[in-house]
Amino acid sequence: MVAHLVTSLQAGNTCFVLVFLCIYQRFLTTQQVLDMLFKRYSSFRTACEEDEQVKNTLCTLLDYWLDKFPEDFCKIEHLPLLQQLKCYLIVNLP
Protein backbone atom coordinates (compact mmCIF):
# COMPACT_ATOMS: atom_id res chain seq x y z
CA MET A 1 0.00 0.00 0.00
CA VAL A 2 2.87 2.38 0.76
CA ALA A 3 4.14 1.95 -2.79
CA HIS A 4 0.82 3.27 -4.12
CA LEU A 5 0.65 6.48 -2.08
CA VAL A 6 2.45 8.73 -4.56
CA THR A 7 0.93 7.16 -7.67
CA SER A 8 -2.56 7.33 -6.17
CA LEU A 9 -2.10 10.99 -5.38
CA GLN A 10 -0.80 11.63 -8.89
CA ALA A 11 -3.94 9.97 -10.25
CA GLY A 12 -6.10 12.21 -8.07
CA ASN A 13 -7.12 9.45 -5.66
CA THR A 14 -6.86 11.41 -2.43
CA CYS A 15 -9.32 9.02 -0.82
CA PHE A 16 -6.73 6.20 -0.91
CA VAL A 17 -4.17 8.44 0.79
CA LEU A 18 -6.63 9.55 3.47
CA VAL A 19 -7.74 5.99 4.24
CA PHE A 20 -4.14 4.77 4.33
CA LEU A 21 -3.11 7.52 6.76
CA CYS A 22 -6.11 6.72 8.96
CA ILE A 23 -5.36 3.00 9.26
CA TYR A 24 -1.66 2.37 8.59
CA GLN A 25 -0.75 2.33 12.29
CA ARG A 26 -2.63 -0.93 12.66
CA PHE A 27 0.02 -2.57 10.48
CA LEU A 28 3.08 -0.31 10.40
CA THR A 29 4.84 2.36 12.40
CA THR A 30 5.35 5.87 11.10
CA GLN A 31 9.05 5.06 10.92
CA GLN A 32 8.39 2.05 8.69
CA VAL A 33 6.22 4.07 6.32
CA LEU A 34 8.85 6.79 6.03
CA ASP A 35 11.58 4.21 5.52
CA MET A 36 9.62 2.62 2.69
CA LEU A 37 8.90 5.96 1.04
CA PHE A 38 12.49 7.11 1.36
CA LYS A 39 13.80 3.81 0.01
CA ARG A 40 11.40 3.87 -2.94
CA TYR A 41 12.26 7.49 -3.71
CA SER A 42 15.94 7.43 -2.78
CA SER A 43 17.26 9.15 -5.88
CA PHE A 44 16.04 11.34 -8.67
CA ARG A 45 17.40 12.08 -12.13
CA THR A 46 18.56 15.59 -12.85
CA ALA A 47 16.36 17.58 -15.23
CA CYS A 48 13.82 14.76 -15.55
CA GLU A 49 10.24 16.02 -15.80
CA GLU A 50 8.78 12.73 -14.53
CA ASP A 51 11.00 12.84 -11.43
CA GLU A 52 10.06 16.48 -10.85
CA GLN A 53 6.40 15.45 -10.84
CA VAL A 54 7.15 12.66 -8.37
CA LYS A 55 9.04 15.10 -6.12
CA ASN A 56 6.11 17.55 -6.19
CA THR A 57 3.65 14.77 -5.39
CA LEU A 58 5.85 13.45 -2.61
CA CYS A 59 6.03 16.94 -1.10
CA THR A 60 2.25 17.20 -1.33
CA LEU A 61 1.88 13.84 0.39
CA LEU A 62 4.24 14.73 3.23
CA ASP A 63 2.62 18.15 3.66
CA TYR A 64 -0.84 16.57 3.78
CA TRP A 65 0.32 13.96 6.30
CA LEU A 66 1.90 16.52 8.61
CA ASP A 67 -1.08 18.86 8.30
CA LYS A 68 -3.90 16.34 8.75
CA PHE A 69 -2.18 13.88 11.11
CA PRO A 70 0.23 15.93 13.25
CA GLU A 71 -0.16 13.44 16.07
CA ASP A 72 1.99 11.04 14.05
CA PHE A 73 4.92 13.41 14.57
CA CYS A 74 4.25 15.53 17.68
CA LYS A 75 5.61 13.46 20.57
CA ILE A 76 9.16 13.83 21.82
CA GLU A 77 9.95 10.28 20.74
CA HIS A 78 9.05 11.35 17.18
CA LEU A 79 11.95 13.80 17.03
CA PRO A 80 14.18 11.30 15.17
CA LEU A 81 11.41 10.93 12.56
CA LEU A 82 11.35 14.66 11.98
CA GLN A 83 15.13 14.76 11.78
CA GLN A 84 15.09 11.94 9.24
CA LEU A 85 12.40 13.74 7.26
CA LYS A 86 14.38 17.00 7.33
CA CYS A 87 17.55 15.25 6.10
CA TYR A 88 15.64 13.50 3.32
CA LEU A 89 14.11 16.77 2.17
CA ILE A 90 17.43 18.61 2.19
CA VAL A 91 19.17 15.91 0.16
CA ASN A 92 16.41 14.91 -2.26
CA LEU A 93 14.05 17.87 -2.52
CA PRO A 94 16.13 21.04 -2.11
Image: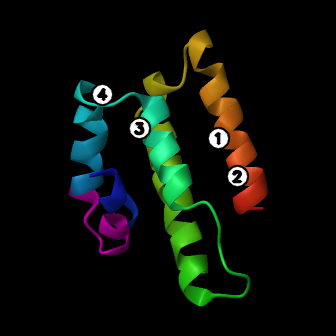
Residue position marked by numbered label 3 in the rendering: 68
Q: Position of residue 27 (x, y in %)?
A: 25, 30
Q: CA distance from mark 1 to mark 2?
A: 6 Å
Residue positioned 61% across, 78% down in the render? 52
Kind of residue indicated by mark 1: Leu
64 in the magenta segment? no
Magenta range is 7-15
Q: Nearer the viewer, mark 1 or mark 3?
A: 1
Residue positioned 21% across, 44% down in the render? 19
Does the residue at mark 1 contact the one at mark 2 (Cβ under 8 Å)? yes
Residue position marked by numbered label 2 in the rendering: 89
Q: Disc 3 or 4, which lies upstream in sequence?
A: 4
Q: How would you classify the magenta stretch by its main secondary structure?
A: helix
Kindly identify which numbered label has been placed on residue 85.
1
Q: Position of residue 43 (x, y in %)?
A: 65, 67
Q: Disc 1 or 4, which lies upstream in sequence?
A: 4
Q: Nearer the viewer, mark 3 or mark 4?
A: 4
12 in the magenta segment? yes
Does the residue at mark 3 contact the one at mark 2 (Cβ under 8 Å)? no
Q: Secondary structure at mark 3?
A: helix
Q: Quadrant of residue 5?
A: bottom left
40 or 90: which is nearer to us?
Answer: 40
Residue positioned 56% across, 69% down in the render? 56
